[in-house]
């Protein structure tokens, strides 16, 4: 299972990719029909819409620097994956982070 994405203050860049790993000679297979949600420290939830080819994005959402978010992904077969809460870096911070989902 590969889940990757980011939270940004630019709405068009808030994309999560969900795919299954496969053999070493093939690319990961996109997952359709997953339930992808972003949750913030205040308890708000933002639903990500299936845009096809394993890509999910929210409608009209921009992250807020300094706010803490985590992602929750439920696959069509009911398996659930969640990231650890992470604070969105402030403006001017160019570091990118990769986290393993539990």
Image: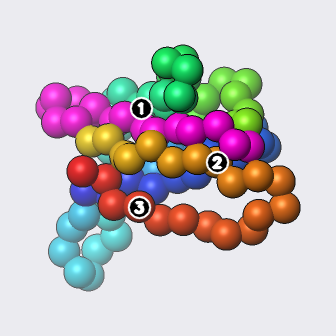
Left or right position of 101 against 95 = left
Q: Secondary structure at mark 2?
A: loop
Foreground disc of the pair 1, 3 = 3
Magenta segment boundaries in residue numbering: 65-80
Furthest residue in direction right, as rendered: 92
The alpha-carbon separation of the residues under discs 1 and 3 comes to 17 Å
Q: Tell me what residue is drawn at x 25 percent, y 56 percent.
A: 1
Question: Which residue ends up furthest to the bottom in the rendered image?
Answer: 25
Query: Label for residue 99?
Result: 3
Vertically, is 23 above or below 80?
below
> How many numbered marks are there?
3
- From the viewer's side, name the closer residue of 15 and 9: 9
Instruction: Report the residue marked by disc 2.
Output: 88
Q: Nearer the viewer, mark 3 or mark 2?
A: 2
Residue assigned mark 1: 36
Q: Is residue 34 magenta?
A: no
Q: Position of residue 87 (x, y in %)?
A: 58, 47
**Which of 3/88 is in front?**
88
**How would you rate the neighbour count of disc 3 (Cα within 10 Å): few for under 14, some for 14-19, many for 20 or more?**
few
List x then y, in percent, for residue 49.
52, 27
Q: Which circle, 2 or 1, is nearer the viewer? A: 2
Left or right of 88 in this view: 47: left
Q: Position of residue 43 (x, y in %)?
A: 49, 18
Real-space CA distance between mark 2 and mark 1, rounded to the nearest whole angstrom: 18 Å
Instruction: Give the crowd class for mark 2: few <14, some 14-19, many >=20 residues within 10 Å.
Output: some
**Which residue is painted at 57% across and 39% down in the image?**
68
Of the residues under marks 2 and 1, which one precedes in the sequence? 1
Residue 48 is left or right of residue 81, and the answer is right
Residue 63 seen in render: yes
Mark 1 / mark 3, whichever is N-terminal: 1
Dot 3 or dot 2: first in sequence order is 2
């Amino acid at each position: 299972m590969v889940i990757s994405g980011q939270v940004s203050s630019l709405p068009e860049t808030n994309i999560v990719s969900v795919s299954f790993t496969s053999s070493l000679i093939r690319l990961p297979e996109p997952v359709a029909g997953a339930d992808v949600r972003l949750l913030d420290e205040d308890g708000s939830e933002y639903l990500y819409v299936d845009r096809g080819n394993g890509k999910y994005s929210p409608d009209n959402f921009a992250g807020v620097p300094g706010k803490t978010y985590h992602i929750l992904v439920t696959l069509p077969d009911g398996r659930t994956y969640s990231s650890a809460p992470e604070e969105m870096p402030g403006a001017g911070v160019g570091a990118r982070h990769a986290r393993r989902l539990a």
